[in-house]
Amino acid sequence: MIKVSDYMTPIVAVVSPYDTLATVRNVMLRKRVGRVPVIEDGRLVGIVSRTDLALALKPDGPPWRRRPLEYISVWEVMSKPVLTITPYEPISKAAEIMLSNGVTGLPVVEEDKVIGMISTSDLTRCLMEQGDPSKKVKECMCREVVVVKPLYTINRVIKLLVETPSHRVIVVDAEGKPIGIITPTDLAFVRVAPPKKKSIVYDDGAPQPSRRIRYLAITYAKDIMKSPLHYISEEASIVDAASLMSSARIGGLPVLDKRKNLTGLFSKLEVLKLVKDLEA
């Protein structure tokens, strides 16, 4: 049996419910983690993730709700109650809990003390080492991929990002070819600053400018997307996909066919499903 303790990561940072999200963001950047346990009086009271930060940055709603991260406390956005797991349980159970509850990490608890975290990144490493190399990406990839255009606003991107289970959207050009990817990390660690002056931008890829768009104090998909892309062939093995995701420290890969057309997405959601069935 592959146990949680075989792949969990020791706790490297915690925060208080009264810390600000700016503090959390700095902790995540320094420690290179995607979620941080929230501790009060020695007790685990919540968990805060990159997705929580991304949602806090959502720029719609009335002005009084659009506060800088320096003015938002952890307790306002943290997830609670917290789902936990022990180090001695099978790693497949950790994957099942994450899948059933839509979370990407679990605090590992022993005798009421948090001793580590088990995350989708850890499970990706597990799949890389324990997965079936004969199983191809095209057999288990997600075929319903959410795509956006380069000039989609950040508000529109966040809405789509939150609604899709993989929490990833692919940026495509006018011909539908993938040119970038956007994840909660890209939103959590970006600072939106108003431009110094207005300018004119055109819809990317149009043969001739048919529409003019004023560049206001808005961030577009093209401004925050990761590019160039890491991608994987649909003929590659799941072990190769997990290996690339682990080495590149990313949570999803656009899947391309022989003609470089986008046919799917292999993300940590697929990793969870595969690890859940590892010992079935």
Image: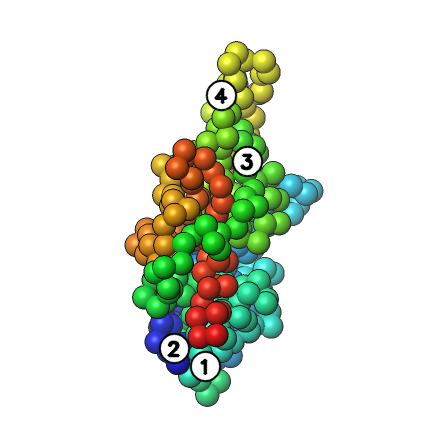
Secondary element at tag 2: loop
Mark 3 crowd level (few <14, some 14–19, many ≥20, 10 Å Cα) = many
Taking the image as shown, residue 237 lies to the left or right of residue 200, namely left
Q: Earlier in the sequence, mark 1 or mark 3?
A: 1
Quarter placement of the N terminus: bottom left
Taking the image as shown, residue 65 lies to the left or right of residue 221, namely right
* Residue 74 in sight in this render: yes
Give me the residue at 56% from left, 32% from top.
152
* Residue sticking out furthest to the front: 134
Label 2 amino acid?
Ile
Q: CA distance from mark 1 to mark 3?
A: 40 Å
Callout in the foreground (2, 3): 2
Check disc 2 and report the residue beneath it: 2
Label 3 amino acid?
Val
Q: Are marks 2 and 4 in contact (CB under 8 Å)?
A: no
Q: CA distance from mark 2 to mark 4?
A: 49 Å
Q: From what the image shows, is residue 107 above or below residue 134?
A: below
Q: Earlier in the sequence, mark 2 or mark 1?
A: 2
* Residue sticking out furthest to the top: 208
Q: Earlier in the sequence, mark 2 or mark 4?
A: 2
Secondary element at tag 3: strand
Label 1 amino acid?
Glu
Label 4 amino acid?
Gly
Q: Earlier in the sequence, mark 1 or mark 4?
A: 1
Mark 4 crowd level (few <14, some 14–19, many ≥20, 10 Å Cα) = few
Secondary element at tag 1: loop
Give me the residue at 51% from left, 14% from top.
207
Check disc 4 and report the residue beneath it: 205
* Residue 189 image position (x, y, % from top left): 44, 47
Check disc 1 and report the residue beneath it: 89
In terms of depth relative to the viewer, which is nearer, 141 or 120?
Answer: 141
In terms of depth relative to the viewer, which is nearer, 244 or 58?
Answer: 244
